[in-house]
Amino acid sequence: MGSKQRNVRRHSYGRGINVISVRNIRLPVGHGAGDVLDEMMRILCLDKIYPGNSYPDLSYRILRRSIDARKKPHIYYVYTVMLLCDSAVEERIRRFHEKNAKKPQVRRFSDKIITDPPAVYSPPECGNEKLSRRPVVTGSGPAGMFCALLLARAGFRPIVIERGENVDDRSRTVAAFWEGGNLSDDSNVSFGEGGAGTFSDGKLNTLTKDTNGRNSFVIRTFYEHGAPEEILYDAKPHIGTDILKSVVKNIRSEITALGGEFMFNTRLTDISDADGKLSGITVMDVATGTVRDIETDICVLCTGHSARDTFEMLYRRNVRMSAKNFAAGFRVAHPQALVNKWQYGTEDPEEIHLPPADYKVTNETAGGRRVYSFCMCPGGYVVNASSEAGGICVNGMSEHGRDGQYANSAIIAAVTPDDYIQDEVPPGHPLAGMYYQRRIEAAAYERGRGCIPFQRFSDYETGTASETVLPDGMVKGTTAAANLKGIFSGEMDEAIIESMHKFGYTMKGFDAGDVYMFGVEARTSSPVRIGRDDGFESNIKGLYPCGEGAGYAGGIVSAAADGIRCAEKIIERYISDGDECGE
């Protein structure tokens, strides 16, 4: 195995650790520092294994920590921990439990003891096919970052094309836009180093199973590049925009140190192929308009769910794609203290040693449409996430501390190709959903006169424009009171109204008349899926559709994991010209 392969293994989580873990350790919030260890020792029956309390030196690593507030005011932290000890101690514990498994005092703890080792990510060996031209990764969001990182560690020296700015310049551009400046079509909340997730909450929870250790590898990589340690074990980990900016720069530094190259302010404008095989790409410097060709055999498409001009170019080039379901609706803001009260029974969670609360709600309406919360941001802001002139879309953003006065979440309704009413293309066209997004964002722009349109829920329900001034600290971007009703279909409006009231049954005040709504949330996921085969290539060989924009992910971790999967396919097949995979 070559040096680059060993480098990846050094970054993998869990090499050489013990495999005995204990789950479902429930302790009241505010518990003492040694309580986790004491409870772990009780469950492992160490008083019986080591009579007289002659315990060896033991410690633990937290694998997971969640909050159980179902019986408030009695709120618990629930831990899964890994025992850290030498192999002789571990073997003694294992033998005791195997020998005494049927005894009641041992059997009652058996379901809490885990002896299977955690999934540990291991990258593939390089293949045998020579790759003489450097691979190109388009987009530096989570999928592009992790694809490029794996390729760089394997010695392929990838070129990363990013239409937006580096994260520092991008932050200044976005801040100026929020203050009322001009929108940049290429560097904004959706485009630029770190991708759309950089100006979000930085949530790292995902519903995908981690059977191969990729998700854990993603989270540990973020930690190794500057994210806080608690992301390694929190059940709902998040980094926050303020810290994530530094993390993505640190990942970029490793990629460039390994021979990778970043080309910011550089937009993919075309692809070239010969006999169905990629031969190169065309890019443009967005500042100067200079066009250049890059010869390559591999281009990994990690352009994100908002790269509409890229979708149009790929369609013209006969790249196979299809329309995909997604969801759309509004951002809804509540006082964070109210959310804390719903979840914890108190408005001030710091008093009981808890973080700002979040929520997750879902409803199937009488008409059969699913409405649910998405990307909930405790203590955050509603932000103008527009990326095209003449359109308005919003998102949510939180700093690491989540210490803002307001919480917000998208309340969105599922939409299908049957809902894609637009005038650009016929029904059933692969880009129909994209043009539908553009139509409703244009309607929001018109309602808000170029600003984020907002409305109180009671006025939305009656279709009356709100005449009010927003409280401070709720929004990043200019706003205008407007009527949001009618941007979507009447059936969509009714589905959202019905669901807001349904959520208010269990969370008092969720549907209060003075709750604010912001339009529109339409970029929940990609409206298209770009086809790929078992080798992750499109019908143009050498073109690898990847991540959220291609329709294969939905969030930071799943997008990063898909970037890893695409990198694996390349590594398994090729060996770089420099032969870095070999000894």
Image (tube, rainbow, N blue to C red):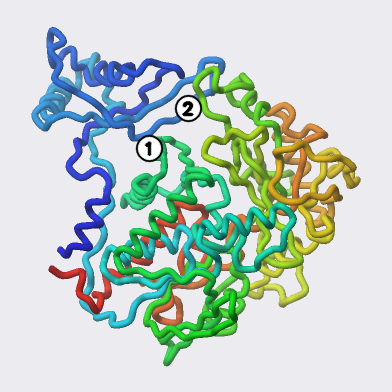
Q: Amino acid at mark 2?
A: Ile
Q: Residue at x 46, y 58 (%)?
A: 142
| Position of residue 543 measured from the top left corner of the image (x, y, whole percent) | 43, 77
Considering depth in this image, is 456 or 489 the residue closer to the camera?
456
Q: Could you say which disc has been placed on residue 545 in the image?
A: none
Q: How far apart in space, not on screen, are marks 2 and 1 (Cα)?
A: 17 Å
Residue located beneath label 1 in the image: 229
Tag in front: 2 or 1: 1
| Position of residue 345 measured from the top left corner of the image (x, y, whole percent) | 61, 19
Left or right relative to 485: residue 519: left
Identify the residue at the far bottom of this view.
Answer: 275
Considering depth in this image, is 466 or 92 the residue closer to the camera?
466
| Position of residue 131 measured from the top left corner of the image (x, y, whole percent) | 28, 80
Q: Residue at x 17, y 42 (%)?
A: 16
Q: Residue at x 79, y 53 (%)?
A: 491
Considering depth in this image, is 123 or 164 the residue closer to the camera?
164
| Position of residue 55 measured from the top left corner of the image (x, y, whole percent) | 15, 16
Residue located beneath label 2 in the image: 67
Packing grade of label 2 (10 A; few <14, some 14-19, many >=20) is many
Q: Amino acid at mark 1?
A: Glu
Q: Element under label 1?
A: helix
Q: Is residue 210 visible?
A: no
